[in-house]
Image: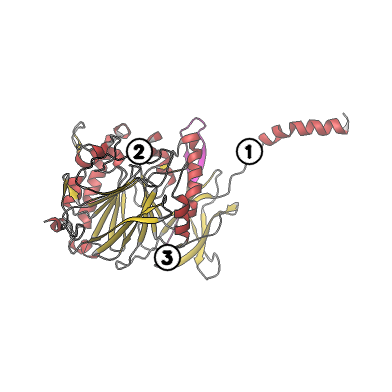
């Protein structure tokens, strides 16, 4: 064979030769942080597609770079799609962090390192004033608020991000490649501040496996429900989905309720409520809403609010439980809108006063913020809402919150459609917390 013919043959065979060599995927990606639930900790989570060591090298900002290190572990996650794609989820817990100190870090192994990121350790003082961005329903396609959130996070505007369910739309799609891409998208937020989550209905495929494997929340419940403390607040994350996906285990509904009651009881002990008077909950599907989509919250007999009578035994709802233990603020998503409610209980308004409804309110304050941006677009409202609906917007956007101190909490809504304009804001002022605040 002539040299020319040999070269041509080799050229035509090149794709076959390339396809015959499996790629090496040891490079860390999808880096994100979460709070470990113990003061002075931060959990770093990332993904590789080949098995490697799990290591984080880090240092105080301004110190010699990477002078400290921590080793963790990796778990194999096999997606349940047709390709049964494999990925390794790495988790490393950093400990003994100095409160409010800034650190730089990268993660990976000698087979590949991530970019260099930075974070500020949470201030575990009960007198700190943490700042949050919170939202739900952020997709891989049409993630309208993402760019603004990326910039504001990197500017240091937030201490924590709360993502209240529905990720990527949907993480399992294309054999979980959509999940990979979404986690890459949020890396520019979640690698800099703790990204705290709860499951939504869009995570349900394969029994929430993509959600349970990809995130690292406190506790031992695969991130389905948990609680943690920050500043003067006790924050509880729940799964509303246990009321809707009974095929995945009706026992989860009762296990969560039992855990939740014990957690609220502990948070309400006088010595605990004295230092962390605010109790804030986050869950995906709201108890109330005025959207025109025939969802659970549009009916008076909401499962999340009132429970289910078609289970054995009947499953209790959450409204009475939250009211009995004096939950102050309830954050929700799911509806692709923003809605602020007057203080409400039992479908009735219990304002503090006509002039100052959120000063010493006589019932919990509900906020629905599910318009961060996804392929399903925003929802429409019922033109005739009930009297508990205080403010509504169909703009794309997200919410901010600051727990200022033990008596004052501030919340506002940002419209991405209006170039970051704050379109709604309230101060919740409470001189007394707990059940006795209602009477």
Is 80 one of the magenta-colored residues? Answer: yes
- Residue at image location 37% in from the left, 36% down from the top: 204
At which x and y percent is residue 325? 18, 53
Q: CA distance from mark 2 to mark 3?
A: 35 Å
Q: Quadrant of residue 300?
A: top left
Is 261 one of the magenta-colored residues? Answer: no
Helix, strand or loop under label 3: loop
| For discs 2 and 1, the disc positioned in front in the rendered view | 2
Quadrant holding the N terminus: top right
- Residue 393 located left or right of residue 363: right
- Residue at image location 49% in from the left, 54% down from the top: 188
Quadrant holding the C terminus: bottom left
The answer to whether residue 95 is above or below residue 244 is below
At which x and y percent is residue 316? 19, 40
Helix, strand or loop under label 1: loop
Check contact, mark 1 vs mark 3: CB within 8 A: no
- Residue 36 seen in the current view: no
Check contact, mark 2 vs mark 3: CB within 8 A: no
Q: Nearer the viewer, residue 347 or 264?
A: 347
The residue at which mark 1 appears reads as 22
- Residue 272 located left or right of residue 213: left
Q: CA distance from mark 2 to mark 1?
A: 36 Å
Magenta stretch, residue numbers: 76-98
| For discs 2 and 3, the disc positioned in front in the rendered view | 2
Q: Quadrant of residue 359?
A: bottom left
Helix, strand or loop under label 2: helix
At which x and y percent is residue 159? 39, 61
Q: How many marks?
A: 3
The residue at which mark 3 appears reads as 97
- Residue 236 seen in the current view: yes
Q: Mark 1 or mark 2, which is nearer the start of the sequence?
A: 1
The answer to whether residue 391 is above or below residue 355 is above
């Amino acid at each position: 064979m002539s040299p020319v013919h040999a070269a041509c043959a080799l050229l035509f065979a090149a794709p076959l030769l390339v396809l015959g060599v499996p790629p090496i995927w040891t490079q860390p990606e999808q880096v994100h942080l979460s709070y470990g639930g113990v003061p002075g900790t931060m959990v770093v989570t990332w993904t590789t597609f080949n098995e490697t060591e799990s290591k984080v090298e880090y240092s105080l900002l301004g110190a010699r770079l990477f002078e400290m290190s921590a080793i963790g572990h990796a778990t194999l996650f096999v997606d349940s799609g047709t390709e049964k794609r494999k990925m390794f989820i790495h988790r490393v817990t950093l400990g003994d962090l100095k409160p409010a100190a800034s650190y730089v870090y990268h993660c990976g192994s000698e087979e590949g390192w991530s970019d260099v990121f930075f974070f500020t350790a949470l201030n575990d003082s009960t007198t700190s004033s943490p700042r949050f961005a919170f939202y739900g329903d952020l997709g891989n396609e049409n993630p309208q608020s993402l760019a603004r959130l990326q910039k504001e996070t990197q500017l240091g505007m937030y201490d924590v991000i709360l993502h209240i369910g529905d990720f990527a739309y949907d993480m399992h799609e294309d054999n979980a490649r959509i999940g990979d891409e979404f986690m890459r998208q949020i890396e520019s937020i979640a690698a800099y501040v703790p990204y705290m989550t709860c499951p939504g209905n869009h995570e349900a495929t394969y029994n929430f496996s993509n959600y349970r494997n990809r995130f690292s929340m406190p506790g031992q419940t695969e991130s389905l429900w948990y609680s943690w403390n920050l500043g003067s607040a006790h924050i509880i994350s729940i799964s509303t989905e246990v009321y809707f996906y009974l095929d995945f285990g009706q026992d989860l509904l009762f296990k969560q309720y039992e855990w939740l009651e014990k957690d609220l009881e502990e948070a309400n002990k006088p010595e605990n409520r004295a230092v962390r008077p605010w109790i804030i909950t986050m869950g995906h599907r709201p108890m109330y809403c005025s959207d025109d989509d025939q969802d659970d919250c549009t009916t008076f007999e909401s499962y999340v609010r009132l429970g289910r009578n078609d289970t054995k035994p009947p499953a209790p709802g959450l409204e009475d439980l939250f009211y009995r233990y004096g939950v102050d603020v309830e954050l929700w998503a799911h509806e692709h809108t923003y809605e602020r409610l007057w203080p409400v209980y039992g479908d009735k308004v219990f304002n503090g006063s006509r002039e100052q409804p959120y000063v010493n309110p006589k019932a919990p304050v509900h906020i629905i913020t599910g318009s961060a941006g996804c392929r399903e677009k925003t929802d429409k409202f019922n033109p005739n809402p009930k009297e508990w609906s205080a403010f509504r917007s169909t703009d794309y956007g997200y919410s901010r919150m600051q727990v200022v101190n033990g008596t004052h909490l501030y919340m506002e809504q940002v419209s991405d459609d209006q170039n970051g304009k704050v379109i709604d804001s309230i101060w919740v002022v409470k001189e007394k917390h707990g059940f006795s605040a209602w009477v």
